[in-house]
Image (spheres, coloured by chain):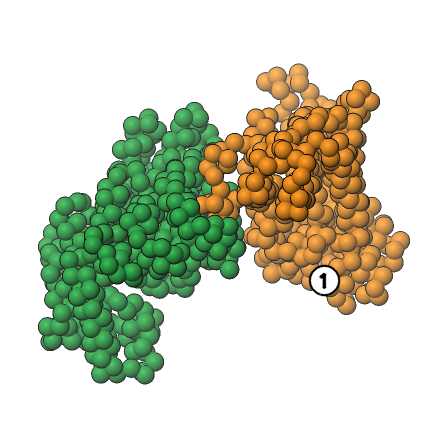
């Protein structure tokens, strides 16, 4: 890969750059505890590494330009910091002025997220509902602007607010609960709700208050919708789990657990292979849950997938997000499992609720903003050694057999159709 | 009533004894039977659509159980159910529109109209519309969860209909039945003309001096090839004989009488000949929702050979062959084992098939499956009466023809069988 070598040089350059001037951004990034030393990996998280390398390759861009761009970005972060210095970016009265109480959508989101059985998208939509409730807007337009701001602050990957809350969370919770602001389902959930807001206001409700009330009601029902979606998926997938089959599962997914739980309740005889799911051990968590249900489980280390594949009848994974091509973004390792099962002619099924459909079209693995996480190797790693910290990968649609969603059992090509229908 | 009962039983018997050959004949007869069932159904004053759906479903379930392998029966039953829902909806929305208009113009005579404000009427219409549409991202937030939880959402439309004016009720009831029967007639017409519609597209696909391979015999394929011939295309056809029933022989004979240059080959010669072939054109038994095909035995082998040599594999299928189900173990569950007498002569092999020898069971077993499953990735193109489609596009056609409610209900009953 020609551009990857360029990227390597570029990263070095930037590393040196960031070491020189102590601009506010580098200060911000170095403030979190050394356990998440992400700042070394991608010093400019606002620009995707892909575009940085692109720029370098086309030789349009010199290091001067990069320095300028960097300065511009750090200016922007400065603005953010000044507007929401205490980590409360979205104060609801921002548009209207004359507000006396402060309200933070992020705090709201965090409080919802502490509930264990709540999906991220649901928490986001509940938080947006709280925004509507706290809002003093008097027209639909104002409300929309406020919601837009709030959802942007939820989605924004590296805002100042995020940095502070993130470091706080790393201290408080184990890593896998920490809020990952690049989460696809979070973005998709916000987008879906925003879409609903614009649709409703355009349609039948002239009265602002009734429209507002209706929006809040719908948002609060969304948790129920999400739960119902999981039930529908579990019911639809029962036909695919036959007696005596062996299912390989990767990562922890509430939907997958629900599917397997329902199958166990329907007295199906099957066994499950769980991958370990390094580094956050999601597989261990799933195997614990399955053991409680008396389903025979076998734990594999992540590298044993190809070794065991000939015993496996189907691969079942969840998804962080389903993208427009019909491919999925899921926990690191899904792609290689899909490749192995494709080469051995085993079906790969994906269980995902339809609110995870996202308007993204990644062309390769590096095309999305990386979701970084810490990895504990047990032994100290020399500082010169780079560590791949990305938490997710992209599995292209040709390696997926079917998607189980609450819209029905779909082939990957249906996803773009559904998205086009919604957003056209 | 009694005469439809007799008709149904007669048809059930025929299905059970496998006396009806070919999915087109089966589909047509099923549709005709359901038409007479509908015309004999007594219409209650309220909830007429539900009554029709109930009676069609009752008959349909028995028909499907009689021959679960002939999926065309289930397809037609679902199509008819979808037709009833659609006609009911169009009548309801028409009535609603009339209601709104009259409510705007004058409110002199009605007392019962007043408790139906325009908004609720629109909401009901929207709700019943959403039951016909397959579930989508749009309806995810709009749709009320409790209404979606109730399986018979159509009844909500029916209830409102019952509460509305009684004067036009009788005319409406006759209208619903009439419309449904009209639409079923159209369906029957579609089924019987699907060959011509498919054959019309032949010239777009078959070019001068090409070599076409087919296996066994299919009326759709025959018409397709002859249509190209009539348009003055000259091409050659290789016909694989299609053991053990050797229907390829009949096809070859028929093609020759129509003046086509034909070559007959054995099934086992397919791989040897495929490198000279420009296109494989075959018929199908059923097309499944994922784009997989249930086809006469031997076709999977042909499809693999075609893939190996990058020859396009084209499947012709009328729209009554589109099945909204996904195949689970199609090789076993959607297959039928025919008599061993097609393979061998009992006179010669009676010794080997003797139950008295050895361990109490005959040493020679004969397996004679009827169908093959061709996975979607081996199919290049489907040609249906609405045009050519990619395998991954099949779900869209299915969403047009069937309503999601029937799909789930039927599936539960068929999986029970």
User: For this rendering, which residue is in front, A242 or A70?
Assistant: A70
Chain that appears green: A
Residue B109, percent from left and from top: 68, 36
Kindly tell me whether residue A9 is visible in this rendering. no
Residue drawn at the location 32% of the way across and 71% of the way down: A51
B31 relative to A118 in the view: left or right: right
Residue A127 lies, with reference to residue B365, above or below; the image says below
Output the chain of dot 1. Answer: B
User: For this rendering, which residue is in front, B157 or B104?
Assistant: B104
Secondary structure beneath label 1: helix
Residue B380, percent from left and from top: 62, 56
Q: Quadrant of residue B61?
A: top right
Query: Which residue was labeled with disc 1?
Result: B205
| Residue neighbourhood size for the residue with mark 1, other residues' Cα within 10 Å, grouped as few (<14), some (14–19), many (≥20) | few
Please identify the residue farthest to the front as the structure is shown. Answer: B108
Residue drawn at the location 29% of the way across and 28% of the way down: A292
Residue drawn at the location 72% of the way across and 29% of the way down: B339
B332 relative to B170 in the view: left or right: left
Please identify the residue farthest to the right as the structure is shown. Answer: B257
Residue A174, percent from left and from top: 18, 45
For the N terminus of chain B, the image quarter is top right
Kindly tell me whether residue A37 is visible in this rendering. yes
Residue A32, percent from left and from top: 12, 58
Q: Quadrant of residue B54?
A: top right
B17 relative to B154 in the view: left or right: right
For the C terminus of chain B, the image quarter is top right
Which shade of the palette goes to chain B? orange
Residue drawn at the location 33% of the way across and 27% of the way down: A293
């Amino acid at each position: 890969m020609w551009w990857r070598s360029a990227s390597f040089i570029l990263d070095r350059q930037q590393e040196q750059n960031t070491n020189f001037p102590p601009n506010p951004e580098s200060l911000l990034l170095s403030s979190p505890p050394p356990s998440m030393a992400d700042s070394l990996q991608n010093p400019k998280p606002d620009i995707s590494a892909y575009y940085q390398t692109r720029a370098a390759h086309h030789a349009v861009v010199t290091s001067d330009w990069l320095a300028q761009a960097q300065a511009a970005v750090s200016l922007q972060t400065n603005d953010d910091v000044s507007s929401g210095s205490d980590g409360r970016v979205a104060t609801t009265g921002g548009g209207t002025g004359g507000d006396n109480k402060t309200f933070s959508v992020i705090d709201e989101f965090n409080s919802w997220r502490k509930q264990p059985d709540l999906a991220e998208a649901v928490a986001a939509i509940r938080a947006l509902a709280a925004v509507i409730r706290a809002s003093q807007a008097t027209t639909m337009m104002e409300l929309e602007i406020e919601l837009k701001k709030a959802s942007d602050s939820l989605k924004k990957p590296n805002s100042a607010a995020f940095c502070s809350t993130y470091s706080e969370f790393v201290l408080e919770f184990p890593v896998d609960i920490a809020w990952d602001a690049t989460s696809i389902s979070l973005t998709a959930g916000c987008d879906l709700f925003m879409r609903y807001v614009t649709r409703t206001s355009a349609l039948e409700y002239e009265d602002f208050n009734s429209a507002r009330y209706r929006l809040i009601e719908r948002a609060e029902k969304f948790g129920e919708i999400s739960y119902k979606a999981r039930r529908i998926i579990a019911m639809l997938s029962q036909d695919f789990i036959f007696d005596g089959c062996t299912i390989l599962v990767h990562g922890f997914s509430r939907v997958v657990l629900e599917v397997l739980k329902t199958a166990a309740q329907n007295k199906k005889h099957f066994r499950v292979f769980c991958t370990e799911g390094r580094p956050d051990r999601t597989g261990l968590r799933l195997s614990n849950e399955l053991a409680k249900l008396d389903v025979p489980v076998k734990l594999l280390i992540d590298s044993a997938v190809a070794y065991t594949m000939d015993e496996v009848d189907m691969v079942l994974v969840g998804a962080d997000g389903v993208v427009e091509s019909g491919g999925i973004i899921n926990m690191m390792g899904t792609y290689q499992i899909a490749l192995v099962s494709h080469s051995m002619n085993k079906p790969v099924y994906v269980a995902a609720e339809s609110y995870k459909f996202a308007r993204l079209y990644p062309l390769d693995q590096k095309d999305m903003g990386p979701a970084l996480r810490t990895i504990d190797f047990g032994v100290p790693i020399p500082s010169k050694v780079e560590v791949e910290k990305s938490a997710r990968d992209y599995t292209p649609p040709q390696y997926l057999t079917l998607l189980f969603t609450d819209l029905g059992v779909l082939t990957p090509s249906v996803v773009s159709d559904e998205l086009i229908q919604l957003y056209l | 009533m009694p005469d439809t009962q007799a008709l149904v039983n007669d048809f059930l018997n025929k299905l059970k004894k496998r006396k009806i050959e070919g999915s087109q004949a089966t589909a047509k007869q099923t549709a005709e039977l359901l038409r007479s069932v509908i015309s004999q159904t007594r219409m209650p004053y309220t909830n007429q659509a539900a009554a029709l759906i109930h009676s069609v479903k009752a008959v349909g379930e028995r028909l499907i159980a009689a021959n679960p392998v002939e999926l065309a029966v289930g397809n037609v039953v679902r199509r008819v159910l979808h037709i009833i829902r659609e006609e009911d909806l169009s009548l309801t929305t028409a009535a609603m529109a009339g209601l709104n208009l009259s409510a705007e113009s004058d409110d002199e005579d009605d007392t019962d109209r007043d408790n139906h404000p325009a908004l609720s009427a629109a909401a009901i219409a929207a709700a019943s519309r959403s039951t016909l549409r397959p579930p989508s991202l749009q309806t995810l937030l709009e749709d009320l969860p409790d209404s979606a939880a109730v399986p018979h959402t159509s009844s909500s439309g029916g209830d409102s209909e019952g509460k509305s004016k009684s004067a036009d009720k009788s005319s409406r009831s006759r209208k619903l039945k009439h419309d449904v029967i009209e639409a079923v007639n159209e369906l029957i017409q579609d089924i019987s003309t699907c060959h011509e519609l498919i054959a019309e597209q032949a010239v777009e696909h078959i070019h001068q001096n090409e070599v076409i391979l087919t296996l066994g015999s299919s009326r759709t394929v025959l018409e397709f090839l002859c249509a190209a011939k009539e348009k003055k295309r000259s091409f050659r056809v290789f016909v694989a004989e299609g053991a053990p029933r050797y229907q390829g022989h009949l096809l070859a004979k028929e093609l020759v009488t129509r003046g086509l240059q034909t070559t007959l080959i054995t099934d086992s010669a397919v791989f040897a000949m495929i490198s000279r072939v420009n296109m494989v054109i075959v018929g199908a038994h059923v097309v499944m929702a994922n784009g997989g095909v249930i086809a006469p035995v031997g076709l999977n082998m042909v499809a693999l050979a075609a893939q190996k040599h990058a020859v396009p594999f084209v499947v012709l299928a009328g729209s009554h062959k589109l099945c909204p189900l996904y195949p689970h173990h199609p090789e076993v569950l959607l297959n039928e084992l025919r008599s061993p007498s097609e393979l061998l002569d009992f006179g010669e092999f009676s010794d080997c098939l003797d139950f008295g020898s050895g361990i109490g069971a005959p040493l020679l077993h004969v397996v004679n499956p009827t169908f093959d499953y061709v996975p979607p990735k081996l199919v290049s193109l489907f040609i249906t009466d609405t045009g050519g489609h990619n395998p991954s596009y099949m779900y869209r056609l299915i969403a047009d023809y069937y309503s999601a409610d029937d799909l789930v209900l039927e599936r539960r009953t068929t999986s029970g069988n």
